[in-house]
Amino acid sequence: MQIARDILLRSYRSMRTIREFEERLHVEFATGEIPGFVHLYCGEEASGVGVCAHLTDTDTIASTHRGHGHCIAKGVGVDGMMAEIYGRQTGVCRGKGGSMHIADLSLGMLGANGIVGGGPPLICGAALSHKTLKDGAVAIAFYGDGASNEGSTLESLNLATVWNLPAVFVVEDNGYGEATGSSYACAGNQKDRAAGFGMPYFECDGNDFFSVYQTAGEAISHARNGNGPAMVHVHLARWYGHFEGDAMTYRAEGEVAELRADHDCLVNFRRRVTEAGLLEAAALDDVDMAVKDAVEAAVVAAKAAPLPVEDDLLKDVYVSY
Amino acid sequence: MSRKSFRQSINEALRQEMRRDPRVILMGEDVAGGRGGTSGVKDAWGGVLGVTKGLLTEFGEDRVLDTPITEASYIGAAAGAAATGLRPVAELMFVDFVGCCLDQIMNQAAKFRYMFGGKARTPLVIRAMYGAGFNAAAQHSQALYPLFTHIPGLKVVVPSSPYEAKGLLIEAIRDDDPVIFLENKVMYDDEEDVPDDPYTIPFGEANLTREGDDVTIVAFGRMVKFANEAADRLAKDGISCTVIDPRTTSPLDTGTILDCVADTGRLVIVDESSPRCNLATDVAALVAEEAFDALKAPIRRVCPPHTPVPFATVLENLYVPNTEKIVAAVRSVASYRMKEEA
Ligand SMILES: Cc1ncc(C[n+]2csc(CCOP(=O)(O)OP(=O)(O)O)c2C)c(N)n1
Ligand SMILES: [Mg+2]
């Protein structure tokens, strides 16, 4: 597989940005300054980035409560995201939505989602738009192993096949829905679910950007070429609790430490591209530094940004009144 | 009697009813937690905010059932189990998730009794968290009790304190109809003296938390606390208020509300739910219809604006009714003079 240098660099930057953003949020959340619920995507970066590397702004994605990574992978800027998470007027959603509702429709980002299983039906609709408007775009639903059990998700798999939609269902299987393991909660398996709805099934290693990139590429081409929906099952792991504040007593001791040590998608990526001579370590170091500065700047700006004002409360309930 | 939090009161009510009646079972997402986990730790969460912690240990996996994330099917299963011999308490976590399972509540459980000509009993309790104040944003902060109140066949409970929560939950579990039991998520750490033994508080009997001559305040759930604070503050200025906690919105204790309004002639209603077609409009209509002659001032409603719940703290604080807004509303009706009086 040949991946152009600019795609590799862009993807690395995206993954590093997600990592830095989330690690920083983990620290900032502990200070008590960040309101509400925060669900971190640390450890899962290669999935969002490996999928979105095949997309343009015309393509649509729907995300989940664990949405920061998908937003960054789809091109939403960290300044607006950070400000949103801090509840500032300069946030991408003007402080009205917060972490769980970051959205930017101009980038084809149909929103993080507070409702598990909220995204897949919306993606059927987005795919219908793309198909009807013949814009050549695809629509991607990211959802978790937990969400794979919602009726709304299963109904969407059916509808997407019935309507032959350019939709891709990306199951991000981190083995848990909150504090419950998918070995308990998911009957059967994702592969048979895809088969049950008559769509092709692809599987990949979510700790490995190249695995995700290659696999998602095939699934997305399938959908983009008018062959109907496909499912991509990404095996990955989350490094932090379900939300910030979760003590994770349901996970074996050392589980996360081992993941960090041996299954870090960023370390894997760096090793692979430097060993193969695709990118130089110095270029990656430059990205690391630039990303660190960008996230730092986003935090500083967010903390200094103006709060929403009373007028904002009543604005934007409707387009017209 | 001992000091208990709202959280402990609910846990104790569940525990005592499960001991009393083996048909009482619990189900919901992570009501225990830890199943399928790699550490083997059971009861890892005991509910997302720890309300059902410890029940798995005492009652086991046959009676404390963790569900997949699949509200339509487990809420429906709870309804079906209720109609066939069990007495399930299903936890919906955030009441907002009713969007995923309303059919099973609205078209199924609520209607069995009537639609089947009085032949069914559906002793189902659905517990859920409601309310703003947690920066949980638009999809995790709604106060949806009017939605359920609107549906004939459902009983709807909105407890205002730890004492109320325990007695009303035990009543709910023993009741033979489907009951929606809504817990305000910012109240779980509130504490007060609560009896250790089981007790029930009947549905449809309001509680007067303050008694006064000038203004009647009807408040629901967490708003009762704010109404009490407002009444205490106003008492210092010589305005005495009656505060009514209806406890249940369905059935609604219309008699107590009308009696109090007959005495005071002035009414303020405090309701945390969206202002259109909510409990405040319902009570206002009741009083306008049944106690028109007693009124000495227009009825005032203290409600949030007709918007989704915003995320940012500043906006959320503006959104939720509070003590200051209640004080202002009471003052305005207390100082109101009819034209002919003036
Ligand atoms: C309809 C609905 N039910 C329950 C929840 C509470 N909840 C939020 S995230 C979550 C777990 C989701 O698990 P999964 O889909 O595997 O995603 P992950 O958190 O692992 O990324 C649950 C149960 C919700 N937000 N919406
Ligand atoms: Mg998961």
Image (tube, coloured by chain):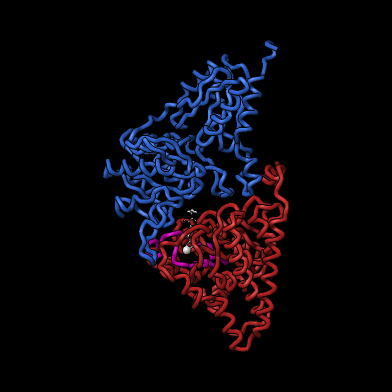
Chain colours: A red, B blue
Instruction: Please tell me which residue is depicted at 44% across the width and 41% down the height of the picture.
Output: B6
Q: Can residue B107 be seen in this view?
A: yes
What residue range appears in magenta?
Answer: A162-185
Vertical relation: B261 (above or below) B1: above
Which residue extends farthest top?
A: B340
- Is residue A165 magenta-colored? yes
- Is residue B255 magenta-colored? no
Q: Is residue A213 visible?
A: no
Vertical relation: B44 (above or below) B238: below
Instruction: Please tell me which residue is depicted at 51% across the width and 64% down the height of the picture.
Output: A240
Figure disc tally: 0
Q: Where is residue A147 in the image (x, y as percent from the top left)?
A: 47, 60
Vertical relation: A215 (above or below) A314: below
The quarter holding residue B228 reads top right
The quarter holding residue B276 reads top right
Of B213 and B151, nearer the camera is: B213
Of A38 and B306, nearer the camera is: A38
Q: Position of residue B45 (x, y in %)?
A: 42, 55
Quadrant, the C terminus of chain A: top right
Q: Where is residue B170 in the image (x, y as percent from the top left)?
A: 35, 37
Q: Where is residue B237 in the image (x, y as percent from the top left)?
A: 63, 22
Of B106 and A306, nearer the camera is: A306
The quarter holding residue B323 reads top right
Instruction: Please tell me which residue is depicted at 70% across the width and 48% down the height of the picture.
Output: A308
Of A318 and A247, nearer the camera is: A247
Quadrant, the N terminus of chain A: bottom right
